[in-house]
Image (tube, rainbow, N blue to C red):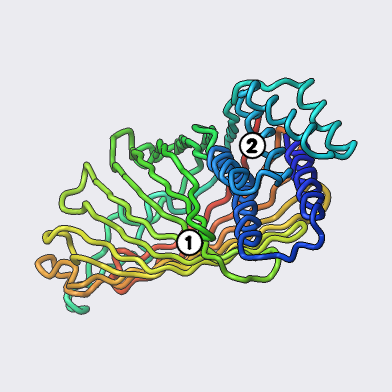
């Protein structure tokens, strides 16, 4: 499929060049510039998987400029990929009789006819993983064994249940992607679970699903995502979540291999086992990404606003989010990934004065993660991941540190 797409692009460019040479004496004018921009929009839509949009743009271009051979060929190939054999054959015949296609283009048309124009079949991707790991602070136990209340006037020794507890665990995940429409909309589902060896009250599982659709307004690219899911803790439903996101790629002139986009979204959190903790979290996050050869890097810096009801401890809160990630090939079939995340929250009012916690909660959580992966073959790989968490707050009872080490087997059938 990829080779066919590349061949189609080269063929259409060749035909487009031949068409441009039909009247060498004609100087480019505004209408020709508009037609070229329209053709580029169609190719962009095709590269983004928006075949329906690409077809509409190419039909519009052919209506304005019937001599644009590249548009005829691209439209024929798209119609064939959608299973519209009769329409594709009419367009192929037009290319062969009206223009003077090269031998390579004629071979491409012949090969396409031989393969047949089958109805559109959605592609899918499945990833399954299982892992074994060790967690030094499963329960997010407090760093200090003594709690200071009322500005240090009261010292309390914490019960053992509030201190860090370590345990080993088994974990698994399933990620599934599938095309929903020929115009680039995809559906996704994710299932994750973790079973501790001894601390079963902290077992977790989650299931999420949603859809994502690409759009384009002129030179502005956009992706809309809607998702929802549930999280369980200790075998009981703990949280429900609903999320909507919009990711926009503005038409900026950037260096090669660099991309800039802006994501904004809202998440609704419903806690079934906690009173007064439901919230709406709003996020605005620009992101820079860079990819070249065997290396990829990204960085994002966002603003967060979390709104709860009037009875929630600390009230509303605001914060910032920073994420930096670098991924590259190391040697042979081995790759590495290093990531750093920092998230801060500051509440609007004192957390719980009636419980001798009069401070305004000020939280900063840092996570450093490193991953080594080795590809065994096309379908199987193993991953070793180390993670360190440092949660610093001005309220002692919420401070904690953690370290995890996990070895996973990944299968992509």
- Which residue sits furthest left? 354
Residue 132 horizontal/vertical position (percent):
57, 39
Q: Is any part of residue 132 visible from this angle?
A: no
Q: How many marks?
A: 2
**Quarter of the picture holding the N terminus:** top right
Q: Is 297 displayed left or right of 211 in the figure?
A: right
Residue at 60%, 30% (x, y): give it: 123
Q: Is residue 250 above or below residue 270?
A: below
- Which residue sits furthest right? 103
Residue 389: mark in rendering: 1
Task: Name the residue nearer the viewer: 396 or 310.
Answer: 310
Query: Which of the 4 quarters of the picture holds residue 394?
Result: bottom left
Q: Residues within 10 Å of mark 2 (few under 14, many from 20)?
A: many
Q: Residues within 10 Å of mark 1 (few under 14, many from 20)?
A: some
Q: Which residue is mark 2?
A: 410
Q: Is residue 198 above or below residue 254?
A: above
Residue at 48%, 68% (x, y): give it: 322
Q: Is any part of residue 200 visible from this angle?
A: yes
Callout 1 secondary element: strand
Residue at 30%, 73% (x, y): give it: 362
**Quarter of the picture holding the C terminus:** top right
Cα–Cα gap, marks 1 and 2: 24 Å
Residue 7: mark in rendering: none
Residue 396 horizontal/vertical position (percent):
30, 69
Residue 214 horizontal/vertical position (percent):
50, 47
Q: Is 324 displayed left or right of 358 in the figure?
A: right
Task: Name the residue nearer the viewer: 266 or 340.
Answer: 266
Callout 2 secondary element: strand
| Chain-order first, disc 1 or disc 2 | 1
Residue 331 horizontal/vertical position (percent):
82, 53
Task: Name the residue nearer the viewer: 117 or 364.
Answer: 117
């Amino acid at each position: 499929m990829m080779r066919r797409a590349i061949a189609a692009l080269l063929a259409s460019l060749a035909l487009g060049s031949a068409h441009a040479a039909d009247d060498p004496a004609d100087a480019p004018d505004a209408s020709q510039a508009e037609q070229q921009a329209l053709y580029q929009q169609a190719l962009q839509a095709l590269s983004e998987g928006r075949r329906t949009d690409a077809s509409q743009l190419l039909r519009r271009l052919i209506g304005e400029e019937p001599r644009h051979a590249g548009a005829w060929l691209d439209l024929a190939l798209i119609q064939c990929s959608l299973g519209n054999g009769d329409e594709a054959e009419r367009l192929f015949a037009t290319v062969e009789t009206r223009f003077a296609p090269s031998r390579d283009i004629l071979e491409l048309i012949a090969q396409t006819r031989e393969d047949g124009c089958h109805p559109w079949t959605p592609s899918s991707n499945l990833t399954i993983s299982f892992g074994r790991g060790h967690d030094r602070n499963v329960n997010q136990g407090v760093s200090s064994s003594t709690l200071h209340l009322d500005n240090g006037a009261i010292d309390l020794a914490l019960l053992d249940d509030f201190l860090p507890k370590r345990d080993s665990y088994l974990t698994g995940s399933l990620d599934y992607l599938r095309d929903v429409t020929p115009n680039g909309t995809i559906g996704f589902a994710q299932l994750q679970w973790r079973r501790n060896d001894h601390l079963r009250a902290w077992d977790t599982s989650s299931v999420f699903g949603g859809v994502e659709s690409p759009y384009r307004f002129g030179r502005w690219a956009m992706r809309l995502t809607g998702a929802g899911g549930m999280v369980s803790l200790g075998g009981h439903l703990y949280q429900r979540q609903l999320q909507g996101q919009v990711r926009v790629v503005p038409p900026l002139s950037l260096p090669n291999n660099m991309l800039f986009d802006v994501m904004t979204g809202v998440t609704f959190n419903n806690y079934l086992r906690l009173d007064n903790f439901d919230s709406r979290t709003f996020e605005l996050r620009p992101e820079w990404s860079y990819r070249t050869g065997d290396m990829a890097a990204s960085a994002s810096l966002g603003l967060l606003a979390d709104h709860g009801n009037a009875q929630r401890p600390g009230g509303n809160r605001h914060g910032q989010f920073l994420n930096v990630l670098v991924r590259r090939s190391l040697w042979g079939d081995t790759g590495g990934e290093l990531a750093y995340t920092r998230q801060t929250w500051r509440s609007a009012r004192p957390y719980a004065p009636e419980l001798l916690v009069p401070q305004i909660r000020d939280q900063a959580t840092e996570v450093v993660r490193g991953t080594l992966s080795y590809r065994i073959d096309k379908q199987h790989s193993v991953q070793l991941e180390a993670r360190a968490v440092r949660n610093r707050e001005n309220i002692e009872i919420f401070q904690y540190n953690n370290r995890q080490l996990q070895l996973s087997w990944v299968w992509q059938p």
